[in-house]
Amino acid sequence: AYDFVSMHPEGAILMLPDGSTRIDFENKKIFRQYATRNAHRWFTYVEDARGRESEDLSLYIITGTDKSSSFGVASFCNAQNQEFSLRFSIDGHTHMHSWSKHHYAESRSGPRLPPGDPTGSDRPVNQSIFLRGFKINKR
């Protein structure tokens, strides 16, 4: 189990029980050039085919990601400036993980284990934790 303690009135915690994998597109210059040449087509598609309208419309081009097969995330606020604690537990046998309950905290963990996989050993690395990239704006 992992115990988190804070004296701050608000905060957030991210747990990656199985670690994570980082993938980055290496040649961003080629990607930017391609985006510059094709942005007008992408915006036309977004506006016409998808029905999105906005003067400040922008698209985010993903050039990297951090992914994991499992996660736990929690946030807390209004802890009344007193010591706040939260526990993240991992069952070594079932590989299930969970947060302790606290009325100042919201927490989630996942994904749920698929039927027939009691240890979670077959979980794909498909939980996107962080994204990197650049934004293009309609001009």
Image (cartoon, grey):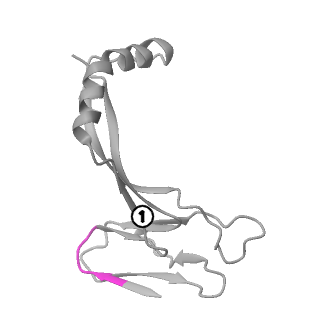
Q: Quadrant of residue 138?
A: top left
Q: Is residue 64 magenta?
A: no
Relative side of 28 to 106, left or right = left
In this view, the residue farthest toward the right is: 116
Quadrant of the rendering where the C terminus is positioned = top left
Q: Quadrant of residue 60?
A: top left
Relative side of 138 to 23, left or right = left
Figure check: 48 above or below 46: above
Name the residue at 29% across, 83% down: 83
Figure check: 80 above or below 33: below
The residue lying toward the viewer, choosing from 130 and 27, is 27
Residue 107 position in % (x across, y down)? 47, 66
Relative side of 12 to 128, left or right = left
**Which secondary structure, mark 1?**
strand
Residue 82 position in % (x across, y down)? 27, 81
The residue lying toward the viewer, choosing from 86 and 97, is 97
Q: Amino acid at mark 1?
A: Thr
Name the residue at 53% across, 56% down: 126
Report which residue position mark 1 lands on: 21
Name the residue at 53% across, 65% down: 69
The residue carrying pointer 1 sits among few (fewer than 14), some (14 to 19) or many (20 or more) residues within 10 Å by Cα, namely: some
The span shown in magenta is 4-10
Q: How many marks?
A: 1
Name the residue at 24% across, 76% down: 81
Figure check: 24 above or below 15: above
Residue 6 position in % (x across, y down)? 27, 80
The residue lying toward the viewer, choosing from 121 and 115, is 121
Q: Is residue 6 magenta?
A: yes
Residue 96 position in % (x across, y down)? 61, 77
